[in-house]
């Protein structure tokens, strides 16, 4: 089968034919229908220090997928059957640590990552641990199914903050930021404002129901937002996000900066008496259930977000477009 591999501990990827994997104990084998490219995959491609410390080449990359179950290698009780359309949760939990014991599986202390710490889904076939396999509702468009990963991040952020009747700012309009706007509207936010310097992303935001989309926040709006979702991971973005949140407001930290960021601790962390919430991943399986419900009820329409489809063999072209940011989610078709 064709697969996209991180073959060497260096920038770039290799496309090559590899054997179809055999599902290990308590794994399922799926025929991949779509895989979507995540911002994390850019870091993996470019071999940033985070990627270098998490990947041991050779590894098949790609973690946002939907596929059809071909084989199940398990005697465990499961509602997953051959022929089901499934997606993968990226955070592979251990079931033994303290966080797993208290059902915080998504922040497991011994977490492995699909398509990062083990082979993933930029390939014609993939194996997924049964415990991180999500059975999709077949009434949801199959094009949306691989994007439940970023949409799930948005759902987790928005539900953790609580946005009903609130004025919400979303700093950074990557796929998760774009989804967060749509989710905030679906969950009854009074006003949703998005900020991004890339016009292409602002156009998508408009289609996804943001009330206002700006390239820059006017100082007049500083300290006026009840909830701020920081999704840029950018030093300047983080600073403006702290300026934007009102006294006593909620600040959700989600975007991961590439380097250390310094902030004005007194001004930003103390004086406004903020509630600061950090979010990593999706709750299992509460977030997936909420996400599925939003898609099934059509309260969220991901079609403006899914802007491009490429054949897997054209991965390099897709990655170039991805890096230009003149796209939403890019689907790969193996
Ligand atoms: Zn992702
Ligand atoms: Zn664990």
Image (tube, rainbow, N blue to C red):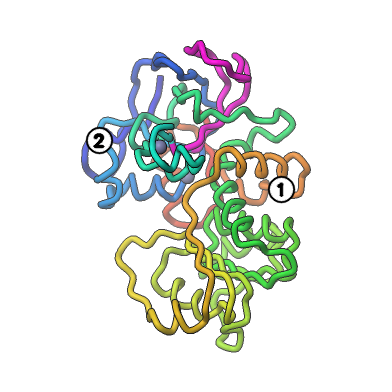
Q: Which residue is mark 1?
A: 301
Q: From the viewer's perspective, is 322 left or right of 81?
A: left
Q: Which residues are magenta?
A: 64-91
Residue 334's place in the image compared with 242, above or below, is above
Q: Between residue 186 and residue 26, name the one nearer to us.
A: 26
Q: Residue at x 59, y 19 (%)?
A: 78
Q: Is residue 204 visible?
A: yes
Q: Between residue 306 and residue 167, name the one nearer to us.
A: 167
Q: Residue at x 61, y 54 (%)?
A: 179
Q: Which residue is situated farthest in the right direction here?
A: 297
Q: Between residue 167 and residue 307, name the one nearer to us.
A: 167
Residue 177 falls in image quadrant: bottom right
Report helix, strand or loop for mark 2. Answer: loop
Decide which of tag 1 and tag 2 comes sooner along the chain: 2
Q: How far is mark 1 from mark 2, CA to CA?
A: 37 Å
Q: Are marks 1 and 2 in contact (CB under 8 Å)?
A: no
Q: Is residue 321 visible?
A: no
Q: Position of residue 13 (x, y in %)?
A: 31, 38
Q: Is residue 314 magenta?
A: no
Q: Nearer the viewer, mark 1 or mark 2?
A: 2
Residue 177's place in the image compared with 331, above or below, is below
Q: Position of residue 40 (x, y in %)?
A: 40, 48
Ligand 2 image position (quadrant): top left
Report helix, strand or loop for mark 1. Answer: loop
Residue 22 falls in image quadrant: top left
Q: Residues within 10 Å of mark 2 (few under 14, many from 20)?
A: some
Q: Position of residue 56 (x, y in %)?
A: 25, 35
Q: Residue at x 49, y 19 (%)?
A: 28
Q: Position of residue 275 (x, y in %)?
A: 53, 70
Residue 303's place in the image compared with 211, above or below, is above
- Note whether ligand 1 is within 8 Å of mark 1: no
Q: Which residue is mark 2?
A: 56
């Amino acid at each position: 089968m064709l697969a996209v591999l991180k073959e060497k501990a260096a920038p770039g990827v290799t496309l090559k034919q590899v054997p179809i994997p055999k599902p290990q104990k308590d794994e399922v084998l799926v025929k991949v229908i779509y895989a979507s490219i995540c911002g994390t995959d850019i870091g993996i491609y470019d071999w940033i220090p985070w990627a270098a410390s998490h990947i041991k080449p050779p590894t098949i990359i790609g973690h946002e997928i939907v596929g059809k179950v071909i084989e199940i290698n398990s005697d465990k009780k499961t509602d997953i059957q051959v022929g089901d359309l499934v997606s993968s949760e990226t955070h592979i939990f251990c079931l033994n640590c303290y966080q797993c014991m208290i059902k915080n599986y998504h922040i497991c202390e011994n977490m492995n990552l699909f398509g990062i710490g083990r082979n993933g889904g930029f390939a014609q076939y993939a194996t997924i641990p049964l415990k991180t396999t999500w059975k999709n509702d077949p009434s949801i468009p199959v094009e949306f199914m691989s994007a439940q990963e970023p949409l799930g991040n948005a759902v987790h952020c928005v539900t953790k903050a609580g946005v009903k009747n609130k004025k919400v700012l979303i700093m950074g309009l990557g796929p998760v930021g774009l989804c967060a706007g749509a989710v905030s509207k679906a969950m009854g936010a009074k006003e949703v404002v998005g900020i991004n310097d890339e016009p292409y992303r602002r156009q998508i935001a408009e289609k996804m129901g943001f009330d206002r989309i700006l390239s820059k926040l006017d100082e007049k709006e500083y300290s006026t937002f009840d909830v701020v979702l920081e999704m840029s991971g950018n030093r300047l973005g983080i600073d403006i996000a702290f300026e934007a949140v009102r006294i006593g407001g909620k600040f959700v930290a989600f975007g991961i900066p590439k380097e250390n960021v310094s902030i004005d601790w007194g001004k930003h962390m103390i004086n406004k008496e903020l509630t600061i919430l950090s979010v990593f991943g999706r709750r299992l399986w509460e977030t997936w259930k909420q996400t599925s419900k939003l898609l099934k009820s059509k309260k969220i329409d991901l079609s403006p977000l899914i802007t491009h489809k490429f054949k897997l063999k054209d991965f390099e072209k897709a990655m170039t477009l991805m890096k230009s940011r003149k796209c939403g989610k890019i689907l790969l078709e193996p």
